[in-house]
Amino acid sequence: MVATKKPDGGNRLISENRRALQRYEIAERLEVGVVLMGSEVKSLRAGKIELLDAFAVIRGGQLELVNAYIAPYPFATLIKHEEKRTRRLLAQRAEIDRLEGKITQRGFTLVALSAYFKNGKVKIELGLGKGRDTADRREDIKRKEGEREARAAMIRAAKR
């Protein structure tokens, strides 16, 4: 059995894209549904998804998820899915129009942050973010490392 975390509200986390939080400054988060085939859902129940390079685009007025890898389900017989196919995302028309304006005018990107089950339906959390410079990433790493060292020093001092 695959070990998956259960976030608040009984949702079951399938996968997380932690690298996206390092590479992008996330300004806004959005929960959307996703249109899947049966073998894809079975594979997701086993936790077989990678969101590392996944992002969303707006084509023809529809939101689509690109580069999300869902492993093939080994027991699928008739209809097997393509692993990296483009999948349609479900969101309100007003929400899509608002996002399209931000993406085209301000240079934002829609990045897939996580995938989870919510009331039996697969949901994808998208983040509207701007890419970070490498200098910004280095500063974050230095800050986190300093905090980690300070915590370790406090623990060592408390043990004495």
Image: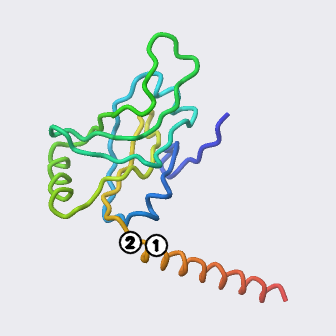
Residue 55 or 32: which is nearer the viewer?
55
Residue at the spot 17% in from the left edge and 56% down from the top edge: 104
Q: Which residue is mark 1?
A: 137
Residue at the spot 43% in from the left edge and 26% down from the top edge: 82
Quadrant containing the N terminus in the rendered view: top right
- Where residue 67 sits in the image (x, y, percent)? 39, 41
Task: Name the quadrant containing residue 68.
Answer: top left
Badge 1 element? helix
Q: Are marks 2 and 1 in contact (CB under 8 Å)?
A: yes
Image check: 50 left or right of 2?
Answer: left
Is residue 134 placed above or below 102 in the rendered structure? below
Quadrant containing the C terminus in the rendered view: bottom right
- Where residue 64 sits in the image (x, y, percent)? 28, 39
Count the numbered circles shown. 2
Residue at the spot 45% in from the left edge and 44% down from the top edge: 115
Q: Which residue is mark 2?
A: 133
Residue 45 or 51: which is nearer the viewer?
51
Residue at the spot 74% in from the left edge and 82% down from the top edge: 155
